Amino acid sequence: MSNAPALDIRGLSAKVADEEISILKSLDLALNPGEIHAIMGPNGSGKSTLAKVLAGHPSYQVTGGEALYLGQSLLDMEPDERALAGIFMAFQYPVEIPGVSIANFLRTALQARLGRGEELDLFDFQDQLLEAMKLLEVEPSFAERPVNDGFSGGEKKRNEILQMAVLKPSLAILDETDSGLDIDALQVVSNGVNTLHKENPEMTILLITHYQRLLDYIKPDFVHVMVDGKIVRTGGPELALELEKQGYVNWKPSS
Amino acid sequence: MADNSTYHSWLNEKRSHAWSVYQSTPTPTTKSEEWRYTDLAKLFPLEQITLEMGLVDSTQRPNREDLIEATNTAGRIQLTDGLVTNIQVDPAVDSQGVGLDSIQNTTHEKYQEIIRTNLCSHVLPPESGKFQALNAALWKDGVVIYVPKNVHVKMPIRGKHTLSTGNSAVCARTLIIAEEGSHVSYVEEFHSDDFSNKSMVSSSVEVVAHRNASVDFVSVQNLGRGIFFQVAQKSLVHRDACVNTLNVNLGSSLSRLDLNTRLLEPGANSKMLGLYFGDKDQHFDHNTSQDHLAPHTRSDLLYKGALDGNSRAAFRGIIRVHSGAQQSDAYQTNRTLLLSEQARADSLPNLEIEADDVKCSHGSTVGQLDPETIFYLLSRGFSRQQAERLIVLGFLGDVMTKLPHGAFRRVVKNVTDAVEQKLRHG
């Protein structure tokens, strides 16, 4: 198991469940444990679809290929099984859950990770939550607010990374976490991700972003360019700068 | 001591009058707008229960004692089959002149006078409807709460209604009078076993909040199946006064709530909250009205429910801003979450506005659990069942967060537990 990549995607194809057109077209991608990868690409290239397919979103249907998580086939697992196995996706558009406080939400989520008959230590939980809130620079009262209900864009994204801090995934997929953030919030959120990665160097991170800006704050080991459902180029952080200068124009499929 | 025989004959005159109103009022049918969603002839034929007018001279005097170790309650009153059996009052509250007593058996002159002025007359007269008349004729006892000028009762008074047997009809009344500048909150709960024969529990509630007074009224209904729970609640809200209500419907087979709040003078305001959870073949019918009769008045209604199984809920709400009630704010929202394909909700919010400078909004939604929300929870490791439970509890619990905080912690917990219990069995 230790030799297996954290995520090994081979020839993955997928489409919207009740439509014909493929969005992911035989995509290949491998991430070793502890690495930070960034996928960049123009709108409509399929970046967010990849994130959702990996998390098991029911609106998408896999039509070919496979995705192995630590050597284990991911595609047959239910979304909650994937989460319990250590996969976390930070949503591009986090969902509002009126009446459910962040504290209650996270307590229940952690309890779900324990075996039958095991009880969550509430003091430990409280400490963890406070620490995570300090990391994301939110007031302690934040935990009593209903999940994302009436939150600003920045608060929603902080809340996603707050959840990541408490749930401690081994593979985190951040879907356009930088979108809708002002520069201060971007720094806080990036600092949160960097700190979590420092604390747990084995954690693998897949950043999905349209803009190079995020990569000024979170340094990826690898940058992939995705166009029309495929990875078309892979390089180091310098690739992001190149894209920033040239845009995605050169990468558009010829027809 | 008051002359109770004079008082009792006065009560009986009121009952006789109400009985004649009852007999001359036709039974509502679905042809009437206010009953279009609830077919009584099918769901609860009145002919099937024995309704007899009987005059009441006295019932057994309730036990009365001091409430000790009263940390979260100002007083308790217990009713069995509509008769007050026990009253406990915090001596500190009692010494401020706060009244908590049986309507039928009070010997207190002041309360008798309050009852004569207010009961079944200008607040909720028997002419308000068939069931309002029935209750006014058949009630045997009820709760009177009187709060003198400028007295603040900090902790809630609690009322508990239970049934010993499935009876033909149990009718109880509640009268709450809050004098100028006073505050009180009352939490009543209805519990019973399930009954195989049809039974009816009827409750008429009259609330008057005088100038600058505030009243919080919470009713939690968790009666057994087989019961028709019929409620009429009416509040009169004077200048700068406030009446907040929360009606929780969880039990019974059929429930019908007629709720009317009248904002009589400038500054009057009211929050009207409702929560319901239906399963199996339960049928809930809410008929609400918010009457703005003076300028600068405010009402805010929020009714939320979840329906499982074959259950059904109807909501018919109306905001009436009468002419001259300028700069009033009136809001009305009804949201229902359907948890099964067979459940059904009808919602009919309405506005009648005769003033031109007002802020009003009304809206209703009936929807299923949102798949995106479920996916969000699944992606955090919740099972589908846990996800649904959390969403429903959050959706309904949201209503209770609008309660004035602190004093109702126990109600919130009891209601949450009861909803969770229903979710487990659903």
Image (cartoon, grey):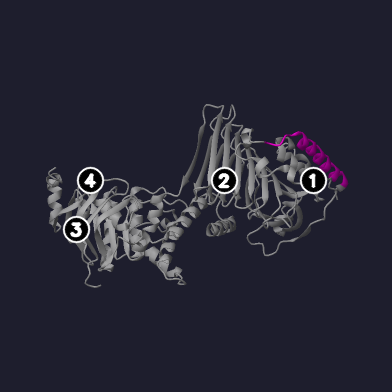
Residue B48 visible in image: yes
Amino acid, disc 2: Arg
Evaluate if marks 2 and 4 touch, with contact meaning CB atoms under 8 Å apart.
Answer: no
Q: Nearer the viewer, mark 2 or mark 4?
A: 2
Name the residue type under label 4.
Asn
Q: Main secondary structure of the magenta part?
A: helix
Numbered tag placed on residue B81 in the rendering: none
Q: Is residue B283 left or right of residue B174?
A: left
User: In the image, which residues are magenta?
Assistant: B5-28
Residue B312 shows which numbered tag?
2
Residue B85 falls in image quadrant: bottom right
Q: Which is more N-terminal, label 3 or label 4?
A: 3
The label number, if any, that marks residue A43 in the structure image: 4
Asked if disc 2 and disc 3 are in contact, CB closer than 8 Å, the reply is no
The amino acid pointed to by label 1 is Gln
Whichever of callouts 2 and 1 sits on the residue coming sooner in the sequence is 1
* Residue at mark 1: B112
**Mark 1 nearby-residue class (10 Å; few <14, some 14–19, many ≥20):** many
Q: Is residue B13 magenta?
A: yes
The residue beneath circle 3 is: A28
Tell me if A249 is positioned left or right of B58 in this view.
left
Quadrant assignment, res A122: bottom left
CA gap, disc 2 and disc 4: 45 Å
